[in-house]
Image (cartoon, grey):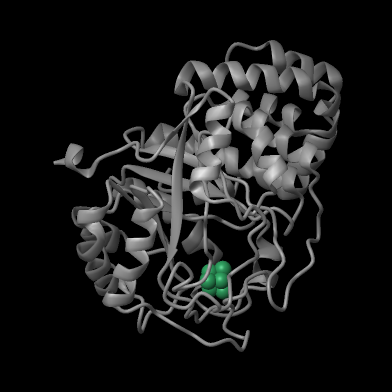
Amino acid sequence: MNSFADIFELHSWDETKASIYAKTSRDVEQALSADKRTLEDFKALISPAAAPYLEQMAQISQRLTLKRFGKVIQMYVPLYLSNECNNICTYCGFSYDNKVKRKTLTPMEIMQEVAVIKDMGYDHVLLVTGEANQTVHVDYFKKVLDLIRPHFAQISMEVQPLDLEDYQQLTPYGLNTVLVYQETYHQEDYKKHHPKGKKSNFQYRLETPDRLGQAGIHKMGLGVLIGLEDWRTDSFFTALHLSYLEKKYWQSKYSLSFPRLRPFSGGLEPKVEMSDRELVQLICAYRLFNQEVELSISTRESPNFRNNIIKLGITAISAGSKTNPGGYSVERESLEQFEISDERSPRQIARVIAAQGYEAVWKDWDNSLAT
Ligand code: SF4
């Protein structure tokens, strides 16, 4: 097997979807009682048949998470460097066809944003850009990493997929984690949502985690954008992808996110709605399936939902996030990538975490450990 694409080809979307919806309460009970859960068990746990078992799933998820991660929640915050983008993505405020003012932060502006982020208490930052290869390229990333490395223990990146050599070049600059979401594993729908730009290459995106594994990245993040397609089927493919990567690139760590489509300027309505209960079901199913993976929740979700999910399997949470370049201090009113749902400050979130007997941790890795 050269890449995940070889495994992906063996799975039909329609057959996978049908097999998830055919799962019965017996399959769910079998999955709940298993010691080590298979991908078929995972299908049962995300199926409609598992809905009445949510309480039981939540209890097991909580126990497994406590055993592996303890009572800690990692804190992180995004730093949007640029909203320039050559891609058309139907669900994003930065899409090329969305007529908004474009901005890429200068080194001085980046440091202004960093000052605010440090003031909030953060030691872990997630760098985010659109895909504009003329301005936001590997040399730009190197400069940014050089600039901010002294200020953070952990630097993650969510930018366009890069070539293997690019990742190999960026790792010595302090890049620790790369997030690359497939958005949807439904190939036809993927084409509809990405009609223009490099992102329309489904295959290149699908094989990006392989390149990250080959580059020896410390941690990689996977996920889909929930709302584009049937979330159960997309989540099965995410779990399949994760299983493949963990076996092949066992030195790397993994995290999963489950962003639900949020309103944005010129917005797309979700094709498929996912209720809060269903999102809890998915989070618990991931935990029951995989005890090592980190599970991350962003400010896309409501305060009430985030308060209640802390104990159920989540290991990382963002707070105080701005989704526009310069949003913390430089240009507060510029267009956001999507609307934030939870506006509470990092300190407020840390207090919510503490009230539940957990500890907010502001870094879980120090790049000095890699040298
Ligand atoms: S999702 Fe990313 S690639 Fe697509 S338009 Fe938005 S910023 Fe650009």
Q: Is residue 142 visible?
A: yes
Q: Position of residue 145 (x, y in %)?
A: 25, 62
Q: Residue at x 64, y 54 (%)?
A: 300
In the depicted view, which residue is nearer to us: 311 or 88? 311
In the depicted view, which residue is nearer to us: 121 or 58? 121
Question: Ligand 1 sits in which quadrant?
Answer: bottom right
Q: Position of residue 63 (x, y in %)?
A: 59, 16
Tell me the quadrant of the picture where the C terminus can be found: top left
Q: Position of residue 110 (x, y in %)?
A: 33, 70
Q: Is residue 37 visible?
A: no
Q: Residue at x 70, y 71 (%)?
A: 192
Q: Is residue 105 above or below residue 319?
A: below
Please indicate whether residue 24 sits to the left or right of residue 140 in the image: right
Q: Residue at x 65, y 17 (%)?
A: 60
In the depicted view, which residue is nearer to us: 343 or 203? 343
Q: Position of residue 151 (x, y in %)?
A: 25, 54
In the depicted view, which residue is nearer to us: 333 or 157? 333
Q: Residue at x 20, y 63 (%)?
A: 146
